[in-house]
């Protein structure tokens, strides 16, 4: 049986007859009569007593009408609600450290002003973990600071960033006008963990100079590295946006690296088969606009 059968049955009950029901539904009278007969044959019950030229609901017909009205009401509710679900669907966004710390809070705040009913959850992880979650459909999209390892994900650049070498103001390097990357790497290295976008970029630049990083300290927490560098435990290469405040307060000193440039893209990642709701598309548009403003 189909919803069409239930709607026809409900119309016959409401109009009190096949002729008026057919007219209200813009159907031929035989089509309405056939639908009622098919219902009775399918369920093996008599829905109407046909006395004279009138139809009277049987007791079974009254029960059937009660369920029919509930079914049709739910269908109408579904029809109305489904058109709005996309605008209320929660967003689960992945982000790597720099974007999640410095850019994402303002983007989420702006988005919430436009979509106050949409729940936004953010998961800040290293880029490798984020890629796995995107491939497992555990996130809607992600904002990361490196190129994806997987060729199965769509990657769109939306902005850029640079990293700088930093040391303690008391470190002898702080007095130098510049160093080579090889010289920097003779110092104890305090780096992000493998799999992070920050570490990936550092390792890539080091490899281009035939160098291999052997860090004294690896951490998933950038702030922990900043604190360790400030205490003179070693040097690090970190995103400028994350060390800018510490440099301004005199806790860290930027060390110019003369033969290496640490630049990277900020990318939007998502699975090509993932349906993006209108709120999701609007959030991605916000990211693109913010990225363009950052690079002006």
Image (cartoon, rainbow, N blue to C red):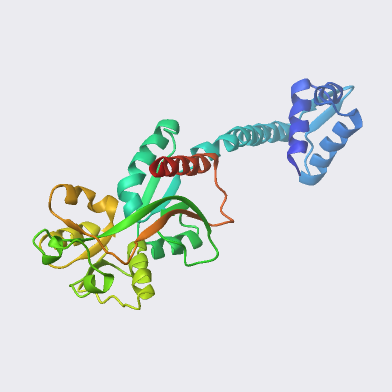
Residue that appears at 16% across and 68% down: 234
Horizontal and vertical percent for residue 278? 54, 39
Decide: is 195 above or below 163.
Answer: below
Decide: is 23 above or below 70.
Answer: above
Image-based side of 221 in relation to 152, left or right: left
Image-based side of 138 in relation to 77, left or right: left
Residue furthest left in the image: 170
In the rendered image, the quadrant that contains the N terminus is top right
Image-based side of 242 in relation to 103, left or right: left
Which is nearer the eye, 256 or 284?
256
Horizontal and vertical percent for residue 156? 51, 53
Res. 140 in view: no
Which image quadrant for residue 28? Answer: top right
In the rendered image, the quadrant that contains the C terminus is top left
Residue that appears at 80% across and 31% down: 48
Which image quadrant for residue 115? Answer: top left
Which image quadrant for residue 223? Answer: bottom left
Which is nearer the eye, 114 or 231?
231
Image-based side of 25 in relation to 151, left or right: right
Horizontal and vertical percent for residue 295? 40, 44
Decide: is 198 above or below 76.
Answer: below
Horizontal and vertical percent for residue 101? 30, 49
Count of residue discs: 0
Residue that appears at 79% across and 46% down: 42
Residue furthest front in the image: 177
Res. 170 in view: yes
Which is nearer the eye, 154 or 208?
208
Which is nearer the eye, 104 or 185?
185
Residue that appears at 44% across and 32% down: 114
Decide: is 104 above or below 198.
Answer: above
């Amino acid at each position: 049986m189909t919803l069409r059968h239930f709607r026809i049955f409900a119309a016959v009950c409401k109009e009190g007859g096949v002729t008026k029901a057919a007219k209200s539904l813009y159907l031929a009278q035989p089509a309405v009569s056939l639908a009622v007969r098919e219902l009775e044959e399918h369920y093996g019950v008599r829905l109407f007593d046909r006395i004279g030229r009138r139809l009277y609901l049987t007791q079974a017909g009254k029960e059937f009408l009660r369920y029919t009205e509930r079914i049709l009401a739910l269908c109408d509710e579904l029809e109305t609600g489904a058109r709005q679900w996309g605008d209320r669907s929660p967003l689960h966004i992945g982000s790597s450290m720099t974007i999640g710390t410095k850019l994402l809070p303002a983007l989420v705040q702006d988005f919430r002003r436009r979509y106050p009913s949409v729940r936004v959850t953010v998961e800040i992880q290293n880029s490798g973990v984020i890629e796995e979650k995107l491939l497992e459909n555990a996130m809607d999209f992600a904002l990361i600071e490196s190129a994806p390892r997987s060729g199965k994900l769509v990657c769109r650049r939306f902005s850029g960033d640079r990293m700088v070498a930093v040391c303690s103001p008391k470190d002898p390097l702080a007095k130098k006008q510049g160093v080579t990357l090889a010289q920097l790497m003779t110092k104890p290295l305090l780096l992000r963990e493998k799999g992070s976008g920050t570490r990936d970029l550092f390792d890539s630049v080091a490899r281009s100079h035939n160098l291999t990083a052997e860090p004294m300290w690896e951490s998933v927490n950038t702030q922990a590295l900043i604190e360790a560098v400030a205490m003179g435990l070693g040097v690090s290469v970190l995103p400028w946006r994350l060390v800018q405040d510490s440099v301004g307060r005199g806790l860290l000193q930027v060390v110019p690296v003369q033969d290496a440039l640490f630049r990277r893209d900020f990318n939007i990642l998502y699975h090509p088969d993932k349906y993006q709701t209108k709120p999701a598309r609007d959030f991605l548009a916000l990211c693109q606009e913010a990225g363009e403003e950052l690079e002006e």
